[in-house]
Amino acid sequence: MPTIMEKEEAHRIIDRLPSDATWDDLMREIYVREVIEHGLSDSKAGRTKEVKEIRAKYGLPE
């Protein structure tokens, strides 16, 4: 389920950008924020996997 955007937080994201920021810079910041929120939500809901399991899936060393 999508997270409700708080306008104040959107303003804070924009205010932290440099004055010469591009639309791509803003979109990247929003994307990063969204990915972090989804990760935290998954973690709280117990939808995580052990690092060992992921490494084994992709044939990476432990």
Image (spheres, helix red, strand yellow):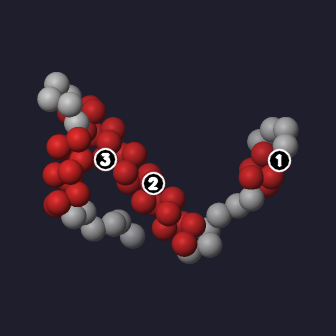
Residue 54 in sight here: yes
The numbered disc on residue 19 is none
Q: In the rendered image, which residue does mark 2 sit on?
A: 36
Q: In the rendered image, which residue does mark 1 sit on?
A: 56
Q: In the rendered image, which residue does mark 3 sit on?
A: 30
Near mark 2 (Cα within 10 A), the count class, few <14, some 14-19 or many ≥20, is: few
Q: Reading the chain from its start, which is encountered first: label 1 or label 2?
A: 2
Which image quadrant: the C terminus? top right
Frontmost of labels 1 and 2 is: 2
Q: Reading the chain from its start, which is encountered first: label 3 or label 2?
A: 3
Q: CA distance from mark 3 to mark 1?
A: 32 Å
Q: CA distance from mark 1 to mark 2?
A: 24 Å
- Determine whether the residue tagged by mark 1 lies in a helix, strand or loop: helix
- Residue drawn at x 81%, y 38% as measured from the top left: 60
Of 11 and 5, the residue lying toward us: 11
Do the residues bearing badges 3 and 2 touch, measured as CB atoms within 8 Å? Answer: no
